[in-house]
Amino acid sequence: MVKANNKSIIFWKEPEEYPIPGEHFGVELREIDENLDDNEVRTRNLYISLDPYLRGRMKGFRANYISGFQIGQKFDNLGIGEVVASRNPKIPVGSIVVGFLGWEEYSRVPATSQLKIIEGARESKFPFSSWVGVLGMPGFTAYASLLEIGKPKAGETIFVSAASGAVGQLVGQIAKRLGLRVIGSAGSDDKVAYLLKDLKFDAAFNYKKGNILESLRAAAPEGIDIYYENVGGETLEAALEVLNIHGRIVASGMISGYNTSTPYGIKNLIHVVMKRIRFEGFVVNDFSAETREKFEKDVSAWLQNGEIIYKEDVTVGLENAPDAFLGLLQGKNFGRAVVKITDL
Amino acid sequence: MVKANNKSIIFWKEPEEYPIPGEHFGVELREIDENLDDNEVRTRNLYISLDPYLRGRMKGFRANYISGFQIGQKFDNLGIGEVVASRNPKIPVGSIVVGFLGWEEYSRVPATSQLKIIEGARESKFPFSSWVGVLGMPGFTAYASLLEIGKPKAGETIFVSAASGAVGQLVGQIAKRLGLRVIGSAGSDDKVAYLLKDLKFDAAFNYKKGNILESLRAAAPEGIDIYYENVGGETLEAALEVLNIHGRIVASGMISGYNTSTPYGIKNLIHVVMKRIRFEGFVVNDFSAETREKFEKDVSAWLQNGEIIYKEDVTVGLENAPDAFLGLLQGKNFGRAVVKITDL
């Protein structure tokens, strides 16, 4: 019998509100699956990424773009690993790969998984975590959705909620580069200071202090043209009030509604009619390969020459992933949230 | 002194909820303005149209596409008139015109107004009211917004609320012609029977009976791809539940929110994110002249050969316009609501 020594994060129970580590999910030691079929690989996992959408997989939305977790199942999500065994000739041992990996130390990765080799990863000046951050899914989300759903034009004003988060910080910086006036909201004074001083936002406010609508009106006396939506609730309601005619709402997420059984009711959607607003959701896989290529070229160049910066909030140790995920849902992270499992 | 003999509907007071005839607006006799400057005409008014958006003009939305009514001002809206005096060489006496007219028996129409002559109106087999109905603004609204915002595809399912109304009845019939499965909701059993028997909808329900979400689910077991939104509130919430991935919401109106100081809060907008929904408002003036031409050609041909029908709810007598408008806001009309002021 194989020794159970593969530290793993397991889904135990569906939460009503916030998922509690130790109650709804937590650490188990499971066996490392040493078997490999044709075209499968085994990875030693380095980073896993923490994303709010995982909360949805803990309750199984009817029309979600990815399957929900089953009780007793391992969490999985985008991660970075080193290939330590391979029966896939295209992915040799030693490759650094990005793709869907279990929240565990070692993964047996099925042939159907679309692992991607990060060329030159070992020599890169960017940390491995970049490929699940600014150069990966959240980066592409920010870039593609801002351009293709938001349709930003120089001189317009954009408001970004959760503006220091994985997606928001990049949306704001790209919008600045395109000549927009950028307003951000975040949940602490430190984050607001970061938006103003480091990311050079034109205005920013702490949504936990004072009235959101008043803060937004003060920051955007001439209204906003784009609302980049990460949070929902009162912030969405305030944005609907100040949006200009032909405004756009890029619906990237609504984290405020993920962890409550009594979501906030939005009472002013009449503005969608009256101001001819386009309010649109998306999933990152819907964007074209061409947009993906442009993203990779643009963002790595901007990052290389320092035109954009990207803040990560790294939790060390897989056993701390549940707490870090809860912290993300509560807005306690400062920057893109990742868990480092081990050094290379 | 000129005799005050021009029966007119005047705005008196801003309503909090429903506008009450005799309290918030009502009949006054005013003078006929016999003066005409260059390029002005005087009309004898035949029909005025009743549209829910007028409720918004009684409270002055910040970003409305048209100015709100001032206290003491005459109502105005799309209407049909006969030109009885003219200093505009392009609009001779005797012309039948459609355009913005006061709710009054005789209007002095400014030079800036874009009155349009209805060619052949006197000989047409269509009643004059058609040019503020199926062949006019509501018809064009239905046609253009369904095609350009809804992007319907054969085999899809559309759900239309207020489906026997000015816009809804046409949306449903056009969608049927395009090969969609059509579901409608309305507020009485008579209207539901009309949708099923006369308009050949595939399914229809009375939203006042039973639970809206259950009725909609039963009518659309495979979900809906387009929601044509006229009402808002619980119906919108139900539509968000059953919309399929990449669903569209054509936001034409939200009448349920027009007459209340405590609008219903929509709690499931998370579906916009999860199902990548596009929820989009518009105003009919935003559509192109090309679309307008196609509309005029298509819809008059369909009407002529009986492929579509169009139900009007005609109130006779200008003095009855306030009651008829209140009835429209309460869903008491059955078909496109117009007021006939006089015969030709």
Image: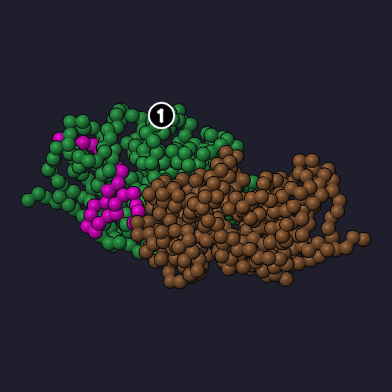
Chain colours: A green, B brown
At label 1, the amino acid type is Lys
Q: Is residue A80 magenta?
A: yes
State which quadrant residue A44 falls in: top left
Image point 44% across, 62% down: which residue? B196
> How far across and down, in percent of the image, does residue B108 sit?
80, 52
Against A112, is B48 above or below?
Answer: below
- Give the chain of mark 1: A
Please tell me how crowded label 1 is: few (under 14), some (14-19), or many (20+) other residues with Cα within 10 Å.
few
Looking at this view, name the residue that lies furthest to the left: A1
Q: Is residue B14 left or right of residue B269?
A: right
Screen quadrant of the C terminus of chain A: top left
- Out of A262 and B71, give the one closest to the viewer: B71
Instruction: Please tell me which residue is depicted at 49% across the width and 46% down the height of the picture.
Output: B147
Q: Secondary structure at mark 1?
A: helix
Q: Residue furthest right?
A: B1
Q: Is residue A203 magenta?
A: no
